[in-house]
Image: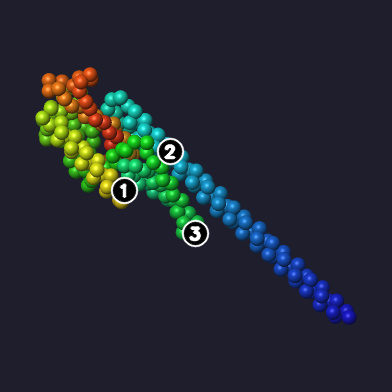
Amino acid sequence: MSRSLNTNQALMELSLTSLGLMIASCILFAAVFSLLFLQDRDTTLELSGIASRFCTEVNNMDLMFLENSTQYYFPVHPQYTISLSTEYIHLSQPRSQNKNVTILRQFLIHPLPCNHSLNPDWSSGDQFHNNFLLSCYHHTGSRHDPIDYANISRVQQYLYNLTLSLQKTLSTFPLMVEKQKPVVLEKIMVYYDSNGNGLWEKASDTFQEFVFLYQDQVS
């Protein structure tokens, strides 16, 4: 009888020990899961903030009334990556269980992210006006030296083709950003002498504008 009681007591103690271990394991699993969840949530919030701030800067540049440029510095973080297309900024950071936290934010406008391999003709607003347009069309396209009437359609077609080419290429192969370098945001404007009098007149002439995004390029 005594031996039976001892056996039952041992079994009960073993069961309680197993139950305790099971409860401890569940608590540990829940704690690890919560920690990973909170880390992923924090990462998502961080990347969302980075993407939103850059989109705001691009939009603000588009709202400029005159040509302008600024340099934008992304936070230097060893893990996350940044890529740009004419529609989106995409950020990705590896997290737990071989998964990535990714953020895709759409621009309000269609900027033109570029580098020298995508656009070898020019790599800044100054080069666009004073090298490319001046050498190809004999005018810089500025307010004081607008594109003459005979070349308006040619310049507009060139810009249309460039935009279309970048849209197609970057939709498949987005431009990767080097976080150690600033991204230059540049508002570029092209003025056209539509009435053929050699001047750009606000009341009767037209212009085009776009936002160019690039990092240090080789001319």
Residue 73 horizontal side relative to residue 142, left or right: right
Q: Amino acid at mark 1?
A: Ser
Q: Amino acid at mark 3?
A: Gln
Mark with earlier residue (1, 3): 3
Q: Mark 1 against mark 2, which lies toward the viewer? A: 1
Q: Which residue is mark 1?
A: 171
Mark 2 to mark 3 CA distance (whole Å): 27 Å
| C-beta proximity under 8 Å, tags 2 and 3 | no
Q: Mark 2 against mark 3, which lies toward the viewer? A: 2
Residue under the image location 15 percent in, 20 percent down? 199
Q: Determine the secondary structure under disc 2.
A: helix
Mark number, residue 206: none
Residue under the image location 29 percent in, 47 percent down? 170
Mark number, residue 97: 3
Q: Determine the secondary structure under disc 1.
A: helix
Mark 2 surroundings: few (<14), some (14-19) or many (≥20) residues within 10 A: some
Q: Determine the secondary structure under disc 3.
A: helix
Q: Which residue is at the far right?
A: 1
**Position of residue 100 measured from the top left corner of the image (x, y, whole percent):** 45, 54
Q: Mark 1 against mark 3, which lies toward the viewer? A: 1
Instruction: Name the residue nearer the viewer: 107 or 73.
Output: 107
| C-beta proximity under 8 Å, tags 1 and 3 | no
Instruction: Name the residue nearer the viewer: 171 or 44.
Output: 171
Regarding residue 101, the answer to whether it shows in the image is yes
Q: Which residue is mark 2?
A: 52
Residue under the image location 31 percent in, 35 percent down? 185
Mark with earlier residue (1, 2): 2
